[in-house]
Image (cartoon, coloured by chain):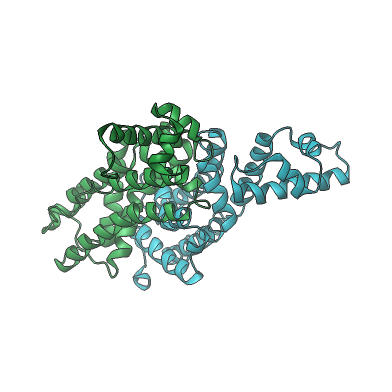
Chain colours: A cyan, B green
Amino acid sequence: MSESFGSSSARKHRAILEAAETLFLRDGYLGTSMDELAERSGVSKQTVYKHFGSKEVLFVELVTTMTAGASDNLDELDSIPDDEADLAPYFMQYAMDEMRIVMTPRLLRLRRLVIGEVSRFPELARALFENGPQRSIQSMAIVISKLVQRGLLSAPSPAVAATTLNWLVLAALVNKAMLLGDEALPTTTAMRAHAAEATRVFLTAYANDTGLDDLR
Amino acid sequence: MSESFGSSSARKHRAILEAAETLFLRDGYLGTSMDELAERSGVSKQTVYKHFGSKEVLFVELVTTMTAGASDNLDELDSIPDDEADLAPYFMQYAMDEMRIVMTPRLLRLRRLVIGEVSRFPELARALFENGPQRSIQSMAIVISKLVQRGLLSAPSPAVAATTLNWLVLAALVNKAMLLGDEALPTTTAMRAHAAEATRVFLTAYANDTGLDDLR
C-alpha cells in the first residue's frame, strides 16, 4: 500500500480487499462488478478506482496476497532427520502440515477461480503455480538432497522424488475438493490415514531402509 | 437429439454444439453470449433456443458429451498380467494410455471451465469427477483385486492402491497444465520417463516381487 494513504485510507484499502475476497471467490471475476465491490466495502466506486485503478488490478493484488500468505507456513527445513527411525514420523508430519495448509475452503476457492481464469490471466495462474505447489516441491527437494547425502534416501533426482511426494500427499484430495466443493474436505482422521499411506509409498520407493514395519 | 428434427435440423444441432465447444472453452460460461453462439453456428438465436432451451442447457449438454466420450477409451481390463514379469510393461502401458487420453488441450480446457464454474454448476463438476478420474480408478481397482488374488500385488484396499496409481500418473502433469495452459503439455519423451517412475514407485509399494531391476 502506498505511504501517502492515511489511516482512514488504509482502512478503506483493507475493506476493499476484504470485499474483493468475498465477491471474487463467490461470484468469479466476470460475475463481480465494481458497483458491488464499492457497496460491500462501504466506499464510493471512485474510491475503489483511486485505490486499485481497475477491477483487473484489484483481482491481481488479491490473488498475489492470498498465494504468498499460504506458502510461508510450511517449515519442512526444520529438524531434518539424521536417523532412519525418524524418517516416517518426519514425513507423516510434513504430509499433515501440507494438507492442513492447502485444504482450506479459502485457498481451494482461490485455486478454482484462478484455474477458471487461466486464459484471461495466464500470469496469475503462473504465480499460483510457482508460489504454491512448485515452491513447496523445491524446498522438499533440498530436504531430500540432504537425506540422500546422509545415506537415508536414494533419489537420482531429488526434484522428481519431491514432486512424487507432493502429489502422493495432495493430489487425490485436491482433485476431489476442486470438483466436489467444500463438502469434500477431508476429516482429520481421513487425512491421517492418507498421510500414513503416502509416507509408506514414498519411503518404500525412495528410502534405503524404511523402518516402516509399523506403517504397513 | 430428438427424432423429430430432420437432417437440416440435425446439422444445425451439431453446428450449435461445435460453436458451443469453441466459445465456452475459449471465453467461459459468463463470457459467452447466445448472440455469438447463434452467429458462429450460422443460425438464428431463435433456432439456438429451439434446440437447447437456454444457455445453461446447452452448457450442460456440451460438458456431458465431452466427458462421456473421453472415459470410454481406456481398456485397462484387457490382458491383465498373470506373471510378475508382465507387471511393469502392463502398468507402463496403462500410464501412457491414461496420459494420452487426459492430457489433451480440449479435455484440460473443459476441466478448467468446469472447475471455474463449480459454484454455479455443482452437478456438472460432480459428473466430471465421477465420469473422469473416479471411473478409471474404479476400473483399476478391479484389476488390482485380480492381481492380489493372483498373488502378484499386496493391497489391503485395492481402491486406495488404484487412487495412488492414478495420481502418481496424472497429478503433476494435470496440475501443471491446469495452471500453465497448453504450453505445459508434456512431450512423449517426458511422458515415458514419468510413466517409468510412476510404475517403479507403484510396484515398489504394492508388488510382492516387482522384477523391476530394469526400471530403476
Q: Is residue B89 visible?
A: yes
User: Would residue B27 be found to the left or right of residue B64 on screen?
Assistant: right
The image shows residue A85 at horizontal and vertical percentages of 43, 67
Please tell me which residue lies in front, A16 or B27. Answer: B27
Q: Quadrant of the N terminus of chain A?
A: top right
Please tell me which residue lies in front, B35 or A212. Answer: B35
The image shows residue B206 at horizontal and vertical percentages of 26, 62
Height in image: B86 above or below A29?
below
Please tell me which residue lies in front, B205 or A26. Answer: A26
Q: Report the residue at 34% width, 32% height from top.
A: B15
Q: Report the residue at 56% width, 43% height from top.
A: A131
Looking at the rendered structure, the number of numbered marks drawn on it comes to: 0
The image shows residue B12 at horizontal and vertical percentages of 33, 32
User: Would residue B187 be found to the left or right of residue A9 on screen?
Assistant: left
Height in image: A104 above or below B170?
below
Q: Quadrant of the C terminus of chain A?
A: bottom left
User: Would residue B208 be found to the left or right of residue B121 on screen?
Assistant: left
Q: Report the residue at 51% width, 37% height from top.
A: A118
Height in image: A194 above or below B36?
below
Q: Report the residue at 47% width, 62% height from top.
A: A184
User: Would residue A85 be found to the left or right of residue A2 on screen?
Assistant: left
The image shows residue A14 at horizontal and vertical percentages of 77, 47
Q: Is residue B185 visible?
A: no
